[in-house]
Image: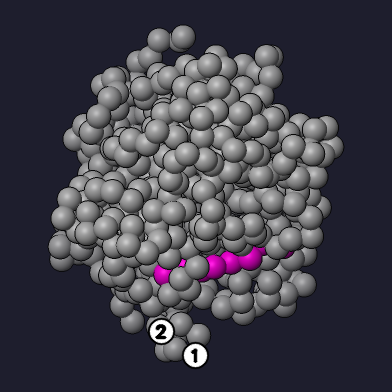
Amino acid sequence: MDRFDYVIVGAGSAGCVLTNRLSEDAGTSICVLEAGPRDWHPYIHLPAGFIKTFHMKSVNWAYQQEPGPWTGGRSIYAPRGKTLGGSSSINGHIYNRGQRQDFDTWAQLGNRGWGYPDVLPYFKRLERRIGEGEDTFRGRDGSLTVTTMEWRDPLCEAFMAGAMSLGIPRNPDYNGAIQEGVSYAQRTIKDGRRVSAATAFLHPARKRPNVHVRTHAHATEIIFDGKRAVGVRYVKGGKGGTPVEVRANKEVILAGGTYNSPQLLQLSGVGSPELLRSLGIEVRHALPGVGEGLQDHYAPRSVARVKNIKTINELRRGLSLWVEALKWATTRRGLLSLSPTMVYCFWHSGETTESSDLQLTFTPASYKEGVQGQLEDEPGMTVASWQQRPESRGYVRARSADPFAPPIIQTNYLIEELDRRTVVAGMKLARRLLASAPLAPYYAYEDFPGPGVQTDDEFLAAATQRGTTTFHPGCTCRMGPADSSWAVVDDQLRVHGLQGLRVVDASIMPRMISANLNASTLMIADKASDLIRGRKPLEAAALSSN
Protein backbone atom coordinates (compact mmCIF):
# COMPACT_ATOMS: atom_id res chain seq x y z
CA MET A 1 0.00 0.00 0.00
CA ASP A 2 1.39 3.39 -1.03
CA ARG A 3 1.89 6.15 1.53
CA PHE A 4 2.21 9.87 0.98
CA ASP A 5 2.16 12.87 3.29
CA TYR A 6 -0.90 14.33 1.55
CA VAL A 7 -3.60 12.71 -0.53
CA ILE A 8 -5.57 15.26 -2.57
CA VAL A 9 -8.88 14.11 -4.04
CA GLY A 10 -9.49 16.04 -7.24
CA ALA A 11 -7.07 17.68 -9.70
CA GLY A 12 -9.38 20.59 -10.43
CA SER A 13 -8.71 24.27 -9.86
CA ALA A 14 -8.07 23.92 -6.12
CA GLY A 15 -6.19 20.62 -6.33
CA CYS A 16 -3.77 21.98 -8.93
CA VAL A 17 -2.83 25.02 -6.82
CA LEU A 18 -2.52 22.91 -3.66
CA THR A 19 -0.24 20.42 -5.40
CA ASN A 20 1.99 23.19 -6.69
CA ARG A 21 2.35 24.95 -3.35
CA LEU A 22 2.65 21.88 -1.10
CA SER A 23 5.26 20.29 -3.37
CA GLU A 24 7.55 23.31 -2.94
CA ASP A 25 8.64 21.53 0.26
CA ALA A 26 10.98 18.93 -1.22
CA GLY A 27 10.61 16.60 1.76
CA THR A 28 6.83 16.41 1.37
CA SER A 29 5.16 13.77 -0.83
CA ILE A 30 1.80 14.38 -2.54
CA CYS A 31 -0.59 12.01 -4.29
CA VAL A 32 -3.36 13.54 -6.41
CA LEU A 33 -6.36 11.43 -7.41
CA GLU A 34 -8.31 12.54 -10.49
CA ALA A 35 -11.35 10.60 -11.71
CA GLY A 36 -10.92 11.86 -15.27
CA PRO A 37 -8.14 11.57 -17.85
CA ARG A 38 -5.13 13.76 -18.56
CA ASP A 39 -5.95 17.12 -20.14
CA TRP A 40 -4.61 16.05 -23.55
CA HIS A 41 -7.70 16.78 -25.63
CA PRO A 42 -7.09 19.68 -28.06
CA TYR A 43 -10.57 21.13 -27.41
CA ILE A 44 -9.47 21.86 -23.83
CA HIS A 45 -6.69 24.18 -24.99
CA LEU A 46 -8.51 25.85 -27.88
CA PRO A 47 -10.52 28.70 -26.29
CA ALA A 48 -13.60 28.14 -28.47
CA GLY A 49 -13.36 24.43 -27.67
CA PHE A 50 -15.60 25.00 -24.64
CA ILE A 51 -18.54 24.57 -27.00
CA LYS A 52 -17.37 20.97 -27.58
CA THR A 53 -16.26 20.01 -24.05
CA PHE A 54 -19.62 21.29 -22.77
CA HIS A 55 -21.17 17.88 -23.48
CA MET A 56 -18.05 15.71 -23.79
CA LYS A 57 -18.49 13.03 -21.13
CA SER A 58 -14.87 11.91 -21.36
CA VAL A 59 -13.81 15.19 -19.64
CA ASN A 60 -17.11 16.26 -18.07
CA TRP A 61 -19.20 14.81 -15.23
CA ALA A 62 -22.27 16.01 -17.19
CA TYR A 63 -24.56 16.06 -14.16
CA GLN A 64 -28.28 16.88 -14.23
CA GLN A 65 -30.02 18.94 -11.58
CA GLU A 66 -33.37 17.95 -10.14
CA PRO A 67 -36.33 20.02 -11.40
CA GLY A 68 -36.97 22.87 -8.97
CA PRO A 69 -40.10 24.79 -7.98
CA TRP A 70 -39.13 27.67 -10.30
CA THR A 71 -37.55 25.91 -13.27
CA GLY A 72 -40.76 25.07 -15.11
CA GLY A 73 -40.41 21.35 -14.49
CA ARG A 74 -37.05 21.31 -16.30
CA SER A 75 -33.97 19.39 -15.24
CA ILE A 76 -31.08 21.80 -15.82
CA TYR A 77 -27.78 20.47 -17.12
CA ALA A 78 -24.82 20.90 -14.74
CA PRO A 79 -21.44 20.33 -16.45
CA ARG A 80 -18.32 19.96 -14.27
CA GLY A 81 -14.76 19.33 -15.37
CA LYS A 82 -13.52 15.73 -15.12
CA THR A 83 -9.88 16.02 -16.19
CA LEU A 84 -6.66 17.61 -14.99
CA GLY A 85 -7.57 21.24 -14.33
CA GLY A 86 -11.18 20.31 -13.53
CA SER A 87 -13.69 22.94 -14.54
CA SER A 88 -10.88 25.39 -15.36
CA SER A 89 -10.19 23.10 -18.34
CA ILE A 90 -13.73 23.34 -19.75
CA ASN A 91 -15.12 26.66 -18.49
CA GLY A 92 -15.56 29.99 -20.28
CA HIS A 93 -12.11 31.27 -19.13
CA ILE A 94 -13.58 34.23 -17.21
CA TYR A 95 -11.52 35.81 -14.42
CA ASN A 96 -13.76 37.64 -11.96
CA ARG A 97 -12.94 37.97 -8.27
CA GLY A 98 -16.06 39.58 -6.84
CA GLN A 99 -16.56 42.50 -4.47
CA ARG A 100 -14.88 43.49 -1.22
CA GLN A 101 -18.09 42.96 0.72
CA ASP A 102 -18.30 39.32 -0.39
CA PHE A 103 -15.22 38.36 1.59
CA ASP A 104 -15.86 40.78 4.43
CA THR A 105 -19.18 38.96 4.87
CA TRP A 106 -17.32 35.65 5.14
CA ALA A 107 -15.25 37.14 7.95
CA GLN A 108 -18.35 38.55 9.66
CA LEU A 109 -19.78 35.03 9.74
CA GLY A 110 -16.95 34.07 12.10
CA ASN A 111 -14.17 33.14 9.68
CA ARG A 112 -10.98 34.82 10.85
CA GLY A 113 -8.52 35.77 8.15
CA TRP A 114 -11.00 35.64 5.26
CA GLY A 115 -11.92 39.33 4.91
CA TYR A 116 -11.04 41.16 1.71
CA PRO A 117 -7.74 42.63 3.03
CA ASP A 118 -6.73 39.07 4.00
CA VAL A 119 -7.53 37.38 0.68
CA LEU A 120 -6.41 40.13 -1.72
CA PRO A 121 -2.69 39.27 -1.30
CA TYR A 122 -3.47 35.68 -2.37
CA PHE A 123 -5.36 36.82 -5.45
CA LYS A 124 -2.30 38.92 -6.31
CA ARG A 125 0.21 36.12 -5.63
CA LEU A 126 -1.54 33.82 -8.09
CA GLU A 127 -1.88 36.31 -10.90
CA ARG A 128 0.15 37.51 -13.84
CA ARG A 129 -2.07 40.34 -15.02
CA ILE A 130 -1.31 41.59 -18.51
CA GLY A 131 -3.15 44.84 -19.11
CA GLU A 132 -4.79 47.59 -17.11
CA GLY A 133 -4.97 47.50 -13.35
CA GLU A 134 -3.57 49.21 -10.27
CA ASP A 135 -0.78 47.35 -8.51
CA THR A 136 -2.67 47.79 -5.23
CA PHE A 137 -5.13 45.22 -6.54
CA ARG A 138 -3.40 43.30 -9.33
CA GLY A 139 -0.53 40.82 -9.37
CA ARG A 140 2.12 40.80 -12.10
CA ASP A 141 4.41 37.91 -11.15
CA GLY A 142 2.13 34.90 -10.59
CA SER A 143 1.60 31.79 -12.69
CA LEU A 144 -1.97 32.49 -13.82
CA THR A 145 -2.01 34.73 -16.89
CA VAL A 146 -5.03 37.08 -17.00
CA THR A 147 -5.63 39.10 -20.16
CA THR A 148 -8.47 41.26 -21.46
CA MET A 149 -10.52 40.19 -24.46
CA GLU A 150 -8.71 41.46 -27.57
CA TRP A 151 -11.58 40.90 -30.03
CA ARG A 152 -13.11 44.20 -31.07
CA ASP A 153 -16.62 43.88 -32.44
CA PRO A 154 -19.03 46.67 -33.50
CA LEU A 155 -21.85 44.96 -31.60
CA CYS A 156 -19.78 44.82 -28.41
CA GLU A 157 -18.79 48.47 -28.77
CA ALA A 158 -22.43 49.45 -29.39
CA PHE A 159 -23.56 47.45 -26.36
CA MET A 160 -21.06 49.24 -24.12
CA ALA A 161 -22.08 52.60 -25.58
CA GLY A 162 -25.67 51.61 -24.83
CA ALA A 163 -24.78 50.83 -21.24
CA MET A 164 -23.10 54.22 -20.86
CA SER A 165 -26.19 55.90 -22.35
CA LEU A 166 -28.13 54.37 -19.43
CA GLY A 167 -25.69 55.80 -16.88
CA ILE A 168 -23.52 52.71 -16.44
CA PRO A 169 -19.87 53.83 -16.54
CA ARG A 170 -17.05 52.20 -18.48
CA ASN A 171 -14.77 50.44 -15.97
CA PRO A 172 -11.22 49.59 -17.08
CA ASP A 173 -10.78 46.97 -14.33
CA TYR A 174 -13.71 45.24 -12.62
CA ASN A 175 -11.20 43.28 -10.51
CA GLY A 176 -9.76 46.53 -9.16
CA ALA A 177 -11.01 49.09 -6.66
CA ILE A 178 -14.66 48.79 -7.71
CA GLN A 179 -16.56 46.21 -9.72
CA GLU A 180 -19.51 48.09 -11.16
CA GLY A 181 -19.48 49.30 -14.75
CA VAL A 182 -19.11 47.80 -18.22
CA SER A 183 -16.01 46.49 -20.00
CA TYR A 184 -14.56 43.75 -22.12
CA ALA A 185 -14.16 40.51 -20.16
CA GLN A 186 -10.94 39.51 -18.43
CA ARG A 187 -9.98 35.90 -19.00
CA THR A 188 -7.33 33.24 -18.47
CA ILE A 189 -6.03 33.12 -22.04
CA LYS A 190 -2.41 33.46 -23.13
CA ASP A 191 -1.29 33.60 -26.78
CA GLY A 192 -4.66 32.32 -27.95
CA ARG A 193 -4.65 29.26 -25.67
CA ARG A 194 -6.49 28.44 -22.43
CA VAL A 195 -4.57 28.87 -19.18
CA SER A 196 -6.15 26.24 -16.94
CA ALA A 197 -5.15 25.50 -13.36
CA ALA A 198 -3.40 22.43 -14.74
CA THR A 199 -1.25 24.34 -17.23
CA ALA A 200 -0.49 27.14 -14.75
CA PHE A 201 0.10 25.09 -11.58
CA LEU A 202 -0.11 21.30 -11.90
CA HIS A 203 2.10 20.61 -14.90
CA PRO A 204 5.01 22.66 -13.51
CA ALA A 205 4.61 20.82 -10.18
CA ARG A 206 4.62 17.40 -11.90
CA LYS A 207 8.26 17.98 -12.82
CA ARG A 208 9.08 17.59 -9.11
CA PRO A 209 9.83 14.05 -7.92
CA ASN A 210 7.55 14.39 -4.87
CA VAL A 211 4.35 14.79 -6.95
CA HIS A 212 2.37 11.70 -7.98
CA VAL A 213 -0.75 12.26 -10.12
CA ARG A 214 -3.11 9.33 -10.71
CA THR A 215 -5.75 9.80 -13.42
CA HIS A 216 -8.82 7.59 -13.97
CA ALA A 217 -8.83 7.25 -10.16
CA HIS A 218 -12.44 7.53 -8.89
CA ALA A 219 -12.42 8.08 -5.12
CA THR A 220 -15.04 5.93 -3.38
CA GLU A 221 -14.40 6.35 0.35
CA ILE A 222 -12.29 8.17 2.92
CA ILE A 223 -10.50 5.72 5.22
CA PHE A 224 -10.73 6.54 8.94
CA ASP A 225 -8.98 5.34 12.06
CA GLY A 226 -11.44 6.45 14.70
CA LYS A 227 -12.01 10.14 14.04
CA ARG A 228 -8.85 10.57 11.96
CA ALA A 229 -8.76 10.39 8.16
CA VAL A 230 -5.83 8.17 7.19
CA GLY A 231 -6.33 7.51 3.49
CA VAL A 232 -8.60 7.14 0.49
CA ARG A 233 -10.05 4.18 -1.38
CA TYR A 234 -10.43 4.60 -5.11
CA VAL A 235 -11.20 2.50 -8.16
CA LYS A 236 -8.59 2.57 -10.92
CA GLY A 237 -10.22 2.85 -14.33
CA GLY A 238 -13.71 3.76 -13.15
CA LYS A 239 -16.68 1.49 -12.45
CA GLY A 240 -15.69 -2.17 -12.63
CA GLY A 241 -12.02 -1.27 -12.27
CA THR A 242 -9.41 -2.23 -9.69
CA PRO A 243 -9.94 -1.15 -6.04
CA VAL A 244 -6.86 0.59 -4.60
CA GLU A 245 -6.02 2.19 -1.23
CA VAL A 246 -3.61 5.03 -0.66
CA ARG A 247 -2.63 6.28 2.81
CA ALA A 248 -1.93 9.80 4.06
CA ASN A 249 0.68 10.36 6.77
CA LYS A 250 -0.49 13.92 7.40
CA GLU A 251 -3.81 14.84 5.76
CA VAL A 252 -6.49 13.87 3.31
CA ILE A 253 -7.64 16.96 1.37
CA LEU A 254 -10.94 16.96 -0.53
CA ALA A 255 -10.79 19.20 -3.60
CA GLY A 256 -13.51 17.50 -5.62
CA GLY A 257 -15.73 20.54 -5.95
CA THR A 258 -19.16 21.62 -4.80
CA TYR A 259 -20.94 18.45 -5.94
CA ASN A 260 -18.34 15.74 -5.40
CA SER A 261 -16.74 16.73 -2.08
CA PRO A 262 -19.98 16.52 -0.04
CA GLN A 263 -20.96 13.33 -1.86
CA LEU A 264 -17.65 11.66 -0.90
CA LEU A 265 -18.07 12.77 2.72
CA GLN A 266 -21.56 11.26 2.78
CA LEU A 267 -20.40 8.01 1.15
CA SER A 268 -17.75 7.85 3.89
CA GLY A 269 -20.31 8.18 6.70
CA VAL A 270 -19.91 11.92 7.38
CA GLY A 271 -23.09 13.97 7.14
CA SER A 272 -26.72 14.03 8.20
CA PRO A 273 -27.47 10.85 10.19
CA GLU A 274 -30.98 10.68 8.74
CA LEU A 275 -29.69 10.82 5.17
CA LEU A 276 -26.92 8.29 5.77
CA ARG A 277 -29.23 5.81 7.46
CA SER A 278 -31.77 6.14 4.65
CA LEU A 279 -29.00 5.10 2.23
CA GLY A 280 -27.77 2.24 4.40
CA ILE A 281 -24.48 4.01 5.14
CA GLU A 282 -23.00 3.65 8.64
CA VAL A 283 -22.84 6.98 10.47
CA ARG A 284 -19.19 7.65 11.27
CA HIS A 285 -19.53 11.31 12.15
CA ALA A 286 -22.76 13.30 12.39
CA LEU A 287 -22.35 16.61 10.57
CA PRO A 288 -25.72 17.84 9.29
CA GLY A 289 -24.31 20.70 7.19
CA VAL A 290 -22.62 18.38 4.67
CA GLY A 291 -24.19 18.97 1.27
CA GLU A 292 -26.60 21.63 2.53
CA GLY A 293 -26.62 25.29 1.49
CA LEU A 294 -25.98 24.89 -2.26
CA GLN A 295 -26.07 28.20 -4.14
CA ASP A 296 -25.65 29.09 -7.81
CA HIS A 297 -26.38 32.01 -10.12
CA TYR A 298 -29.54 31.56 -12.21
CA ALA A 299 -29.58 33.35 -15.56
CA PRO A 300 -32.34 33.93 -18.08
CA ARG A 301 -30.77 34.84 -21.44
CA SER A 302 -32.48 37.65 -23.36
CA VAL A 303 -32.07 37.37 -27.14
CA ALA A 304 -32.49 39.95 -29.92
CA ARG A 305 -32.36 39.35 -33.65
CA VAL A 306 -29.65 41.24 -35.49
CA LYS A 307 -29.62 43.06 -38.85
CA ASN A 308 -26.97 44.81 -40.97
CA ILE A 309 -24.03 42.88 -39.50
CA LYS A 310 -22.74 39.33 -39.16
CA THR A 311 -22.75 37.67 -35.74
CA ILE A 312 -20.76 34.68 -34.52
CA ASN A 313 -23.72 32.49 -35.50
CA GLU A 314 -22.84 32.96 -39.18
CA LEU A 315 -19.06 33.22 -38.80
CA ARG A 316 -18.77 29.68 -37.46
CA ARG A 317 -20.21 28.03 -40.59
CA GLY A 318 -18.79 26.81 -43.88
CA LEU A 319 -15.94 28.72 -45.52
CA SER A 320 -15.96 31.38 -42.78
CA LEU A 321 -15.05 28.75 -40.19
CA TRP A 322 -12.16 27.45 -42.31
CA VAL A 323 -10.86 31.01 -42.62
CA GLU A 324 -11.12 31.42 -38.83
CA ALA A 325 -9.35 28.09 -38.24
CA LEU A 326 -6.47 29.20 -40.46
CA LYS A 327 -6.35 32.55 -38.65
CA TRP A 328 -6.08 30.82 -35.27
CA ALA A 329 -3.44 28.37 -36.51
CA THR A 330 -1.24 31.17 -37.83
CA THR A 331 -1.89 34.06 -35.42
CA ARG A 332 -3.73 32.53 -32.39
CA ARG A 333 -6.41 35.18 -32.96
CA GLY A 334 -9.91 35.32 -34.39
CA LEU A 335 -13.11 33.44 -33.68
CA LEU A 336 -11.48 30.31 -32.24
CA SER A 337 -9.64 32.38 -29.63
CA LEU A 338 -12.91 33.67 -28.18
CA SER A 339 -14.71 32.98 -24.92
CA PRO A 340 -18.48 32.52 -24.65
CA THR A 341 -18.79 35.95 -23.03
CA MET A 342 -17.20 39.12 -24.42
CA VAL A 343 -18.55 42.01 -22.37
CA TYR A 344 -19.23 42.20 -18.64
CA CYS A 345 -21.62 44.62 -16.99
CA PHE A 346 -22.24 45.03 -13.25
CA TRP A 347 -25.09 47.21 -12.07
CA HIS A 348 -27.91 47.75 -9.58
CA SER A 349 -31.39 46.25 -9.57
CA GLY A 350 -32.75 49.36 -7.84
CA GLU A 351 -31.81 52.80 -6.58
CA THR A 352 -31.46 51.61 -2.97
CA THR A 353 -28.98 48.83 -3.73
CA GLU A 354 -25.68 49.60 -1.99
CA SER A 355 -23.46 47.70 -4.42
CA SER A 356 -24.09 46.13 -7.79
CA ASP A 357 -26.32 43.10 -7.32
CA LEU A 358 -26.75 42.32 -11.02
CA GLN A 359 -24.24 40.80 -13.41
CA LEU A 360 -24.97 40.94 -17.12
CA THR A 361 -22.95 39.51 -19.97
CA PHE A 362 -23.12 40.28 -23.67
CA THR A 363 -22.26 38.06 -26.63
CA PRO A 364 -22.79 38.81 -30.35
CA ALA A 365 -24.24 35.31 -30.73
CA SER A 366 -27.28 33.30 -29.62
CA TYR A 367 -27.96 29.70 -28.70
CA LYS A 368 -30.74 27.35 -29.70
CA GLU A 369 -33.64 27.27 -27.24
CA GLY A 370 -32.99 24.85 -24.44
CA VAL A 371 -29.61 23.81 -25.91
CA GLN A 372 -26.75 25.66 -24.27
CA GLY A 373 -23.62 25.33 -26.32
CA GLN A 374 -25.32 25.07 -29.74
CA LEU A 375 -25.39 28.26 -31.79
CA GLU A 376 -28.45 29.31 -33.78
CA ASP A 377 -28.43 29.66 -37.55
CA GLU A 378 -29.91 33.16 -37.84
CA PRO A 379 -28.10 36.30 -36.56
CA GLY A 380 -28.58 36.99 -32.86
CA MET A 381 -27.14 38.67 -29.78
CA THR A 382 -27.62 37.65 -26.17
CA VAL A 383 -27.62 39.30 -22.75
CA ALA A 384 -27.53 36.91 -19.82
CA SER A 385 -28.56 38.59 -16.56
CA TRP A 386 -28.35 37.22 -13.05
CA GLN A 387 -28.53 38.14 -9.41
CA GLN A 388 -25.06 38.30 -7.89
CA ARG A 389 -25.88 37.30 -4.31
CA PRO A 390 -28.89 34.95 -4.26
CA GLU A 391 -30.64 34.05 -1.02
CA SER A 392 -32.05 30.72 -2.22
CA ARG A 393 -30.26 27.57 -1.09
CA GLY A 394 -30.51 23.94 -2.08
CA TYR A 395 -28.51 20.79 -1.41
CA VAL A 396 -26.31 18.01 -2.77
CA ARG A 397 -26.99 14.50 -1.47
CA ALA A 398 -25.65 11.08 -2.32
CA ARG A 399 -28.28 9.25 -4.36
CA SER A 400 -27.30 5.85 -2.98
CA ALA A 401 -24.37 4.06 -1.37
CA ASP A 402 -23.02 3.49 -4.88
CA PRO A 403 -20.06 5.88 -5.38
CA PHE A 404 -20.63 5.82 -9.15
CA ALA A 405 -24.23 7.05 -8.93
CA PRO A 406 -24.42 10.79 -9.65
CA PRO A 407 -25.44 12.89 -6.62
CA ILE A 408 -28.86 14.45 -6.22
CA ILE A 409 -28.43 18.15 -7.05
CA GLN A 410 -31.30 20.43 -6.03
CA THR A 411 -30.34 24.09 -6.33
CA ASN A 412 -33.78 25.52 -5.47
CA TYR A 413 -33.34 28.51 -7.76
CA LEU A 414 -35.63 31.49 -7.03
CA ILE A 415 -37.38 30.02 -3.99
CA GLU A 416 -36.70 33.29 -2.11
CA GLU A 417 -38.83 36.27 -3.12
CA LEU A 418 -35.85 38.65 -3.23
CA ASP A 419 -34.24 36.44 -5.86
CA ARG A 420 -37.36 36.50 -8.02
CA ARG A 421 -37.59 40.30 -7.82
CA THR A 422 -33.91 40.75 -8.66
CA VAL A 423 -33.98 38.36 -11.62
CA VAL A 424 -36.98 40.25 -13.06
CA ALA A 425 -35.09 43.54 -12.61
CA GLY A 426 -32.14 42.02 -14.46
CA MET A 427 -34.32 40.99 -17.41
CA LYS A 428 -35.82 44.47 -17.59
CA LEU A 429 -32.34 46.01 -17.65
CA ALA A 430 -31.28 43.52 -20.35
CA ARG A 431 -34.22 44.67 -22.47
CA ARG A 432 -33.25 48.33 -22.05
CA LEU A 433 -29.64 47.58 -22.96
CA LEU A 434 -30.53 45.65 -26.12
CA ALA A 435 -32.98 48.38 -27.19
CA SER A 436 -30.56 51.25 -26.43
CA ALA A 437 -29.92 53.86 -29.12
CA PRO A 438 -26.32 52.83 -29.94
CA LEU A 439 -27.52 49.30 -30.80
CA ALA A 440 -30.45 50.55 -32.93
CA PRO A 441 -28.65 50.14 -36.30
CA TYR A 442 -28.24 46.42 -35.56
CA TYR A 443 -31.34 45.65 -33.48
CA ALA A 444 -34.11 43.95 -35.47
CA TYR A 445 -36.46 42.82 -32.69
CA GLU A 446 -36.56 41.09 -29.32
CA ASP A 447 -36.85 37.34 -29.74
CA PHE A 448 -36.87 36.35 -26.06
CA PRO A 449 -38.65 37.03 -23.80
CA GLY A 450 -40.46 38.90 -26.60
CA PRO A 451 -42.50 42.12 -26.74
CA GLY A 452 -45.58 40.37 -25.35
CA VAL A 453 -43.85 40.07 -21.98
CA GLN A 454 -44.48 43.27 -20.00
CA THR A 455 -45.54 42.59 -16.39
CA ASP A 456 -43.33 41.32 -13.57
CA ASP A 457 -45.27 38.05 -13.51
CA GLU A 458 -44.72 37.60 -17.25
CA PHE A 459 -40.99 38.25 -16.90
CA LEU A 460 -40.83 35.77 -14.02
CA ALA A 461 -42.69 33.15 -16.07
CA ALA A 462 -40.18 33.66 -18.89
CA ALA A 463 -37.29 33.27 -16.43
CA THR A 464 -38.66 29.93 -15.24
CA GLN A 465 -39.01 28.72 -18.85
CA ARG A 466 -35.53 29.52 -20.08
CA GLY A 467 -33.27 30.35 -17.14
CA THR A 468 -30.21 28.13 -16.65
CA THR A 469 -27.19 27.72 -14.44
CA THR A 470 -24.19 29.97 -14.94
CA PHE A 471 -22.01 27.05 -13.76
CA HIS A 472 -21.13 28.68 -10.42
CA PRO A 473 -22.14 26.14 -7.74
CA GLY A 474 -20.79 26.67 -4.25
CA CYS A 475 -21.45 26.51 -0.50
CA THR A 476 -22.09 22.80 0.19
CA CYS A 477 -19.31 22.34 2.82
CA ARG A 478 -19.53 25.79 4.32
CA MET A 479 -16.83 27.40 6.42
CA GLY A 480 -17.99 28.63 9.82
CA PRO A 481 -17.76 28.28 13.60
CA ALA A 482 -18.19 24.86 15.21
CA ASP A 483 -21.29 25.99 17.12
CA SER A 484 -23.23 26.80 13.95
CA SER A 485 -25.63 24.16 12.68
CA TRP A 486 -24.63 24.66 9.04
CA ALA A 487 -20.81 24.72 9.07
CA VAL A 488 -18.74 21.79 7.82
CA VAL A 489 -15.21 23.22 8.08
CA ASP A 490 -13.54 25.79 10.35
CA ASP A 491 -11.60 28.81 9.14
CA GLN A 492 -8.55 26.58 8.68
CA LEU A 493 -10.74 24.44 6.35
CA ARG A 494 -10.53 21.46 8.76
CA VAL A 495 -13.67 19.32 8.93
CA HIS A 496 -15.35 19.95 12.29
CA GLY A 497 -14.91 17.09 14.75
CA LEU A 498 -12.45 15.09 12.62
CA GLN A 499 -8.67 15.05 12.33
CA GLY A 500 -6.45 14.92 9.27
CA LEU A 501 -9.24 15.99 6.90
CA ARG A 502 -9.79 19.28 5.10
CA VAL A 503 -12.01 20.49 2.29
CA VAL A 504 -10.44 23.00 -0.10
CA ASP A 505 -12.66 24.05 -3.01
CA ALA A 506 -15.69 26.24 -3.81
CA SER A 507 -17.89 24.17 -1.49
CA ILE A 508 -16.37 25.92 1.56
CA MET A 509 -17.75 29.33 0.57
CA PRO A 510 -20.20 30.30 3.32
CA ARG A 511 -22.11 32.60 0.96
CA MET A 512 -22.25 33.08 -2.77
CA ILE A 513 -19.97 35.81 -4.09
CA SER A 514 -20.68 38.49 -6.71
CA ALA A 515 -18.67 36.68 -9.37
CA ASN A 516 -17.85 33.59 -11.35
CA LEU A 517 -16.20 31.21 -8.89
CA ASN A 518 -12.97 30.08 -10.53
CA ALA A 519 -10.75 32.98 -9.44
CA SER A 520 -11.87 32.66 -5.82
CA THR A 521 -11.47 28.88 -5.84
CA LEU A 522 -7.84 29.33 -6.86
CA MET A 523 -7.43 31.92 -4.09
CA ILE A 524 -8.98 29.57 -1.50
CA ALA A 525 -6.47 26.88 -2.41
CA ASP A 526 -3.51 29.25 -2.34
CA LYS A 527 -4.47 30.53 1.10
CA ALA A 528 -5.14 26.98 2.28
CA SER A 529 -1.65 25.91 1.22
CA ASP A 530 -0.16 28.32 3.74
CA LEU A 531 -2.53 27.06 6.45
CA ILE A 532 -1.61 23.44 5.72
CA ARG A 533 2.13 24.16 5.63
CA GLY A 534 1.96 26.13 8.88
CA ARG A 535 3.28 29.22 7.16
CA LYS A 536 2.54 32.72 8.31
CA PRO A 537 -0.28 34.17 6.18
CA LEU A 538 0.54 36.89 3.70
CA GLU A 539 0.33 40.35 5.22
CA ALA A 540 -3.17 41.81 4.94
CA ALA A 541 -3.56 44.56 2.36
CA ALA A 542 -3.74 48.13 3.62
CA LEU A 543 -6.75 49.60 1.83
CA SER A 544 -8.62 52.86 2.09
CA SER A 545 -12.17 52.51 3.37
CA ASN A 546 -13.86 54.10 0.35
Disc number at residue 237?
2
Residues under numbered marks 2 and 1 in contact, where contact means CB atoms less than 8 Å apart: yes
Q: Residues within 10 Å of mark 1 (few under 14, many from 20)?
A: few
Quadrant in the picture for residue 523:
top left
Q: Position of residue 307 (x, y in %)?
A: 52, 40
Q: Tell me the kind of residue under disc 2.
A: Gly
Residue occupying image coordinates x 43% and y 45%? 310
Task: Quote the CA–CA distance across marks 2 and 1.
Answer: 8 Å
Q: Residue furthest front?
A: 308
Residue occupying image coordinates x 48% and y 73%? 57
Q: Position of residue 254 (x, y in %)?
A: 46, 59
Q: Is residue 467 left or right of residue 525?
A: right
Q: Secondary structure at mark 1?
A: loop
Which residue in the protein does label 1 denote?
A: 240
Q: Nearer the viewer, residue 395 or 460?
A: 460
Residue 407 to residue 137: above or below: below
Colour mode of the rendering: one colour
Q: How many marks?
A: 2
Q: Nearer the viewer, residue 17 or 301?
A: 301
Q: Nearer the viewer, residue 498 or 292?
A: 292
Q: Is residue 63 magenta?
A: yes
The dominant secondary structure in magenta is loop
Q: Is residue 48 magenta?
A: no
Residue occupying image coordinates x 33% and y 82%? 1
Q: Tell me the kind of residue under disc 1.
A: Gly
The residues colored magenta run 59-66
